Every structure is written in structure tokens, then in C-alpha cells.
Amino acid sequence: MRILVIGNDSRIGGRLTTALLARGHNVIGTTRNVKNIKNPNEIFFDLASNDQPALPETEAAVVCAAMARFEECRNQPELAYRVNVEAPVAIANQLVPRGTHVLLLSTSAVFDCYEPLRKAESVRAPRSVYGRLKTEAESRLLERGQRTAVLRLTKVLNPEGGILTKWIDDLAIGEEIKAFEDHRFCPVPLCAAVDAIAAIIGSGETGLFQLSGANDISYLEAALHLASRLGRSPEKVIAVSAAANGVLMNEITPYTSLDTSRLSQMIGFVPPCAFDVIDTVYGPTLARAVHNNGRYKRKND
């Protein structure tokens, strides 16, 4: 297939492009940083721009790029609306009439996050600005009725950056870390997200899909698990409240897990347990830290 990846330099987009190329597909990736353009199959495309260029002819397109940080969406609402709603809709309006199957990546934040394992057809009631934007984008794409699909994701983990990687760094050299006891997430590995995306665009099916781990855990539970894996005392992990540390109540998530029935039926996906995801994703990093036994150094040291 000839596939367009919007946001080729994003965390998911980059890994998706690599995986699709390995499977023999012809991939065109977009970036908003001209310095990242290194070959004819990479093109400039900025979702924040009001002047969108013509996109190439492809059989499928995946919108990976987004403005996903809750605080940024709250503080820059006009920009966030343009990136998360107007741009994906414009992309679909341009590509769908030409026969392109468009897949939008979305989030569990379209729900209120008060109950676990939400079904795809559950009533959406977003509490955050980001969730409201994604809710509108979903609706406007899916109302086309054909050649459009949405994949909702819980927290996608990869070992390159992020708070859990920093915690491993800090714990490995004996430092204390602080973790929220009242803020929860449901991890899923990046490789699972890539496989799900490839399956959906390969099938050409439309409508709603959801990818999630099996259960939610607090950031405190995740931190304590990492400390245990590193042989560090649980006293190195300090429990703190998200609400007492500046996180808005409408951005604290008691539950983010989703029901994955449709995707499971399509590709046999089995939602992994949260701690298993952490062990799989961060296994090499943890093993290196344990092997060095206190002589661990951060990559940038």
C-alpha cells in the first residue's frame, strides 16, 4: 500500500513508518520541521498552519500528529483547536473524496475517566480541553460515514523519554522520586499501537476502535514497581497528591482503560497487564541499571 503518515517525526508516527516500510509498504511521512526532510518521501506539513498544501495520492493516511499535552491545550485553545480539530477534518475533507482511508488517533480522554474499561459506544463526557477537542474531531470525521476510522489509545509507553524513564535514572543512582497516588493510567506498549494501526488501515474498516492495557495503576504503583525491580527501598518513592501539586481536578484521571473487543476480534489482541507492560518496555533499561549496580549513569552524563 501507499500510506501517508501525518506526523512522521512523532513518537508513534516514527515507529509506525519504520514498521510499515519493513512490511513492504510505500510510506510518505510529513514533518513540520524542514530540517527533518531527508528524502523525497518526507514532506513539509504543519497542522498549525491555516494554509494547508495539497497532499499526495495514497490509499491510506494516519493522523499521528496532535497537540496532546493537557496544559498546552488549556493555555493555547485557539492553536489546539486548529491542530486537533480543524487540521484533521481538513485532511479528511481533502483525502476521503479521493478514495483514501483516513485513520485518526484519539484518546481515552474523550470519556470522563470515572469508570474502567469503557466501551467504544459509551457516552463521551470529556473533562479536559484536550478530551473535548478530540471528541469533536472524532465526531466530525466519523460523520462522513465512509473511509474514516478512529483509534482511541490509552497511555502508550516507550523507553525513550517520559517520566518513567526519568524515574529509572533517578532511582538507579539512589535518588528519591515523587509519584502521584491519586492519578492513574493504563499503559500499552508502542509496538501494540503500531500493530493495531497497521491492521486497521490494512483492513480498510471504518468506525471506532480502542487499544488499551488490561488495568489501570497509579503513578505511585508504577514508581514502586520500578523501585522493586531496581532493588531500591520503597522509601525512595514519595507518595504525593496530584491535586495538591497543581494538577487540575478535571485533568486527574481515576481510570483510563478501554474495552478492546473489536480490535481483539480483528487481530487477536489480548490487553496486557500494566506491570507486564512496564517490564517489557523498560526491561533493557532496568537490566542495564541493575547490572551497573550503583555505577549507573544517565545517558546525558
Image (tube, rainbow, N blue to C red):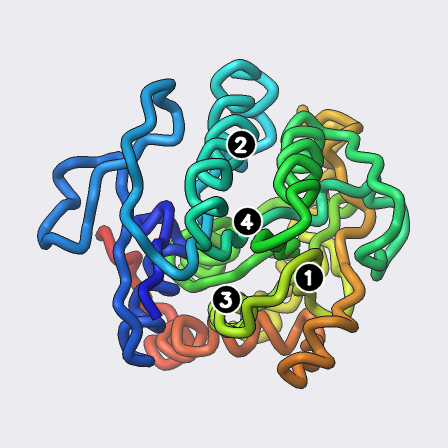
Precedes in sequence: disc 1 or disc 2: 2
Residue nearest the viewer, comparing 191 with 232: 191
The residue that mark 3 highlights is 201
Precedes in sequence: disc 3 or disc 4: 4
Task: Assign a secondary structure to mark 1.
Answer: strand
Task: Assign a secondary structure to mark 2.
Answer: helix
Q: Position of residue 300 (x, y in %)?
A: 23, 51
Residue 107 relative to residue 16: left or right: right
The residue at the point 68 percent across, 49 percent down is: 145
- Amino acid type of the residue tagged 3 in the rendering: Ile
Q: Alpha carbon of mark 1 to alpha carbon of mark 3: how far?
A: 12 Å
Precedes in sequence: disc 4 or disc 1: 4
The residue at the point 27 percent across, 47 percent down is: 56
Tag of residue 209: 1
Q: Position of residue 86 (x, y in %)?
A: 52, 26
Q: Position of residue 26 (x, y in %)?
A: 26, 68
Up the image or down, 187 lies above or below 65; here it is: below
Q: Alpha carbon of mark 3 to alpha carbon of mark 2: how far?
A: 21 Å
The residue at the point 20 percent across, 44 percent down is: 43
Precedes in sequence: disc 4 or disc 2: 2
Q: Nearer the viewer, mark 3 or mark 4?
A: 3
Q: Alpha carbon of mark 4 to alpha carbon of mark 1: how far?
A: 10 Å
Residue 167 seen in this snapshot: yes
Residue 221 relative to residue 102: left or right: right
The residue that mark 4 highlights is 104
Residue 103 relative to residue 128: left or right: left
Tag of residue 84: 2
- Amino acid type of the residue tagged 4 in the rendering: Leu
